[in-house]
Image (tube, rainbow, N blue to C red):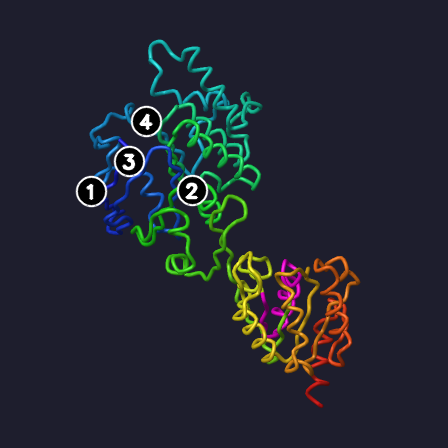
Amino acid sequence: MDSHIQVEKLSFSYDYKKVLEQVDMSIKKGCFFCLVGPNGSGKSTLLKVISSALKPQQGVVYLEGRNIVHMKGRSVAKLLSFVPQNTSLEFDFKVSDVVLMGRYPYINKLKGETREDLTIAEKAMEYTNTTHLRDRSFMELSGGERQRVILAQALAQEPDILILDEPVSHLDLQHQVEILNLIKKMCVDRKLTAITVLHDLNMASAYGDYIVMMKDGKIMRQGTPFETLTAYNIKEIFSTDVYVSVSPVGNKPYIYTLTRPNIEKRGIKVHIICGGGSGSSIIGKLHSEGFDLSSGVLTIGDLDWKISKENDVLIAEEVPFVGISDEAYAMNRKLAAEADAIVLAGLYLGKSNMRNLELLLEEDLKGKPLIIIEDDSFAERDYTGGTALQLYELIKGRSSSILADSKRLSEEILKAVGTHGEK
């Protein structure tokens, strides 16, 4: 059987408030399965019903083909371990005893724990880096330490299915990554099925094989990270504008929030010739100061392209690994012509993007104020055998060209545009 868990037509209410409505989903073996959604969307309740902590009011949950409500508690516990949000205990225990509690489905009440139980508990502490805490009081631990101990307890249970409700919410970044790496490794090496609630969409994208997006007790979207974590879906479910790119690490979607502060506009258009990160700080600075920006020609996925997208900048763009096409060049020329001033950033130049420099010698741009960010490094950035340097010297020699320090860029633009407007 491919599915560990099958959920069919599941509904649940607290008093008269419905928190789950007609939920259907299938959870496959060895899958890292993430539930995401706004607070109050029913994620935690769904986990509790799946783990048999709550009984379905309508619908059914099948655990390896068996209706979970007809299974004995120990039978469920041998297959499934649940790690709740709240890691506090009613009574205090040593850490080693807390971890050993995970062996309860296997321990004979008359004989007590065996050497095998102790060994398994020890390994669980090693996995979660809690061995050094073994003789400490559980109540004395920090929130992050408690979370790791409770995870060790769950691992000691040797489940096929691990259900975790916000397992990293109390951990710093280092321990978040440590725990999620551990869970992911177990999914791969041991064919463990992990079902977890994560609030960080980038964490869900990085670790999740399958994403379920919930809102108002319903499943809105489900599928792979690329199928679910789109700007449209995130806007619909979280009411937040984002830009979704692809992370260079792991080839998964990466979500950038789009900040929209109330910035007073100056009514001055600036076109930025940049690429490879050379324009990132310029774009951020000028955008925050109220200039209307455009940029180009930028390769799709380039850092300056991403920053431009994040700041809602108009872009002349091109696909990766090709030269600048006539279409992209024409768009770049159009944006430059419409601008009140042009900024040339300190980009690296090769055969693929030489046309960005050639653009600045076009006759219709001859009188346009051109602010050149000068840093005496052009020769080092020229990968054309000197051709780009020759063009650069011609561009610098134009009467409308102004050499400027990036720190005084805004002042130079305002000065140049004002002067230009008086001519």
Q: What's drawn in magenta, residue-wise?
A: 274-297
- In space, the residues marked 2 and 3 are separated at their CA atoms by 17 Å
Among numbered discs 2 and 1, the one appearing first in the sequence: 1
| 325 is higher (above) or lower (below) than 266 | above
Residue 58 on image: x %, y %: 19, 43
- In space, the residues marked 2 and 4 are separated at their CA atoms by 21 Å
Among numbered discs 1 and 4, the one appearing first in the sequence: 1
Image point 68% across, 81% down: which residue? Answer: 366
Of badges 3 and 1, the one in the foreground is 3
Q: Residue 24's image quarter?
A: top left
Residue 295 on image: x %, y %: 59, 69
State yes or no: discs 2 and 4 in contact (Cβ < 8 Å). Answer: no
Image point 47% across, 26% down: which residue? Answer: 92
Q: Residue 402's image quarter?
A: bottom right
Report which residue position mark 2 lands on: 208
Q: Amino acid at mark 4?
A: Leu
State yes or no: discs 2 and 1 in contact (Cβ < 8 Å). Answer: no
Among numbered discs 2 and 4, the one appearing first in the sequence: 4
| 160 is higher (above) or lower (below) than 232 | above
Instruction: Please tell me whether residue 296 belongs to the stretch shown in magenta.
Output: yes
| 179 is higher (above) or lower (below) than 256 | above
State yes or no: discs 3 and 4 in contact (Cβ < 8 Å). Answer: no
Among numbered discs 3 and 4, the one appearing first in the sequence: 3
- In space, the residues marked 3 and 1 are separated at their CA atoms by 13 Å
Disc ID at residue 79: 4
Tell me if mark 2 has few (under 14), some (14-19) or many (20+) residues whose alpha carbon lies within 10 angstroms of its own.
many
Report which residue position mark 1 lands on: 59
Report which residue position mark 3 lands on: 5
Of badges 2 and 1, the one in the foreground is 2
